[in-house]
Amino acid sequence: MKKLLFLVNVDWFFISHRLAIAEKALIEGYEVTIACRFTEHKAELSALGFNVVDIPFSRSGGGARAEINTIKAIKKVIEDVEPSLIHAITIKPVLYTGVALKAVKKDIPFVAAISGLGYVFTANTFRAKVTKLIASVFYKVALSQKFKTVIFQNTSDEAILTRVAKLKRTDKVLIKGSGADLSVYSFKPENLNQAPKVAMACRLLKEKGVYQYIEAAKVVKASHSDVEFLLIGTPDLENPNTVKQIEIEQWVNEGIINYLGHRNDIPDVFSESNIVCLPSFYGEGVPKVLIEAAACGRAIVTTDNPGCRDAVIDGKTGLTVPVRDSNKLAEALMQLIENTQLRLNMGLQGRKFAEQEFDVNSVVDKHLEIYSALLARGDQ
């Protein structure tokens, strides 16, 4: 039996971004093992037919000894599972699995999914530059496997790591994001009988542009007091750059936003909104929330940031603005608030774009094709 081993940082991310691929792999006859840090979904994943293994991934960093122990744990999982194929997802699992494979000393076919490079390759602080140098060395080692496919979500990340790891054309593929279930994220006409609603949904980190969103909301509401600004998501307490709950409460008390917290009904939230906004300057892959917004047929306002700009056709399915520029963000939002027909047309074009680029079934099929091709190369 073909054995597929997924290595990912945490269970909830796997469920939201890769579960459909794993389920299709089961149908295709793979024995599938998921190795990650589990929060509350271990039993759920086991019940679906997956083998589950704990890996002590730390998102905020636990010191050199803890990180080395994580690499050792990955090496042990690889030796115990004896996979035919490994699929590592997000930065730390990709880097640590690549290093562990060197210690295992077997040419196991390796899929490395780069879903954004984080802040390291975009920030200009001294600390970021040092981290970039270290990360570049790690990437050279991790992506030096004999049989590999590196999956990029945007061309900016592809260019950076192609240069850093000296990747050949046959080593890489571009797949724009994790896809969306177009039957769940379906198009519904806007409700034009209500005051305009703008929605922002994300992990509530500073780099996601939350503060710029708040400042833009203040500007817009100064002349369009009826516009409702929604903020969806929760603070990420493990991240030092999280937005604080006390700040959210202050914005609510000042009447700037309505805060919805964590929601499991994002298709409904977007369908009840008129515009979806994500002013991120984070090192994104292709933000899933923008894929979902396009699938729901909603005009998008986002930044000209790698990953974000890949989720829209500027001027056709949405508008892009410079990063960290709340005034330009406000101008773009007001343009769509005031021009209903432009906004509606962008929503319709966004749905077509989603059908062409972001159908989860197409994304799943592409991954299974990658698996088959890599296994064939490994058998030669």
Image (cartoon, helix red, strand yellow):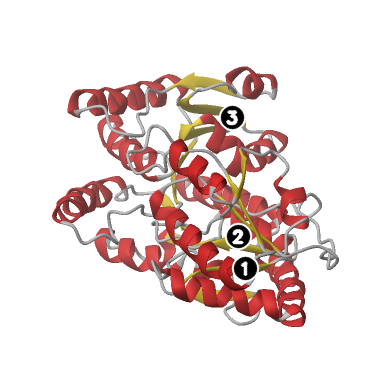
Taking the image as shown, residue 124 lies to the left or right of residue 277, namely left
Give the distance between the C-alpha atoms of the residues marked 2 and 3, in whole angstroms.
29 Å
Residue that appears at 43% across and 68% down: 305
**Residue behind mark 2:** 290
Q: For mark 1, what is the residue?
A: 300
Relative vertical location of residue 8 with respect to residue 62 in this rendering, above or below:
below
Amino acid under label 3?
Val
**Closer to the camera in the image, 295 or 240:** 240
Tell me the distance, in whole angstroms, between the alpha carbons under discs 3 and 1.
Answer: 37 Å
Residue 260 marker: none
Query: Along the line of sight, which residue is nearer the eye, 200 or 117?
Result: 200
Which residue is tagged 3?
A: 32
Residue type for callout 1: Ile
Foreground mark, 2 or 3, reads: 2
- Quick check: marks 3 and 1 in contact, CB under 8 Å? no
Upstream in the sequence, badge 2 or badge 1? 2
Please, what secondary structure does the residue beneath circle 1 have?
A: strand
Residue 335 in the image, given as x and y percentages of width and height = 62, 80
The vertical placement of 286 against 21, above or below, is below
